[in-house]
Image (spheres, rainbow, N blue to C red):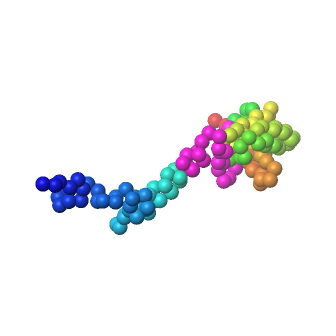
Amino acid sequence: RQIEARGGPGASGPPPGHLNALASGAMQNRPGRSRLPLAGLLVALLVVLGAAAALADGAPEAHPARAALALKSQNPVTVRGTGFQAHSGVTVTLFDGRTLVRRPVADRRGMFTASFPAVIDRCSAWSVTASQPGRAPVVLHGAKSECAPASTP
């Protein structure tokens, strides 16, 4: 009795010529299989890697679309700026009957603090302007000079 090693009835394993079929590429595109899921996975991976690279420490920090000033102290006058161009100088000017100028540098988040040797109260007429080259100046105003006197107890 002769037993066939391959291809006989009930035999298991790859059909004859299987290795030749792989080498020629005949079995690479099987019906029912699509390369689309693999391509989608590759695109998703590239998007995730791109987002991670953008958030890396070496990437420039985004700044808010609008710069702003806030009064932090009246004695001495101290203002805080946010939303300015990072790592860039800012010209900050206080007008309170005289003109005082400071030139802080915005940090990596576009923030700075500037203090002036001046005191303002609720009736002082004053303004603070902060500007950077190529950007619109930001102005913070104090009270008008028609301020009514404070009531006394």
Q: Nearer the viewer, residue 148 or 142?
A: 142
Residue at the farthest bottom position: 31
Q: Quadrant of the N terminus?
A: bottom left
Q: Quarter of the image holding residue 121?
A: top right
Would you say 63 lies left or right of 44 here? right
Q: Nearer the viewer, residue 24 or 100?
A: 24
Quarter of the image holding residue 114? top right
In the image: residue 60, left or right of residue 36: right
Give the left or right position of residue 52, taking residue 89 as reference: left
Residue at 67% from the left image edge and 45% from the top image edge: 60
Residue farthest along the left direction in this orientation? 1
Q: Find residue 102 and report its horizontal and vertical position in percent.
A: 81, 38
Q: Is residue 58 magenta?
A: yes
Residue projecting furthest to the right: 98
Q: Is residue 76 left or right of residue 19?
A: right
Above or below for 16 versus 72:
below
Q: Which segment is the magenta one?
A: 49-72
Expressed as whole percent of the image width and height from the top left, the position of residue 117 reads: 80, 32
In percent of the image, x 81 and y 43: which residue is there? 91
Number of numbered labels in the structure image: 0
Q: Residue at x 87, y 41 (%)?
A: 98
Query: Of residues 4 and 72, which is closer to you in this image?
Result: 4
Q: Position of residue 95 (x, y in %)?
A: 82, 44
Residue 30: quarter of image: bottom left
Q: Quadrant of the C terminus?
A: top right
Residue 145 seen anywhere in this rendered image of the structure? no
Q: Is residue 112 visible?
A: yes
Residue 83 locus on image (x, y percent): 68, 47
Residue 35, compared with residue 69, is above or below; it is below
Asked if residue 71 is among those painted magenta in the image, a careful observer would answer: yes
Instruction: Out of 142 and 92, give the one closest to the viewer.
Output: 92
Q: Residue at x 77, y 53 (%)?
A: 135
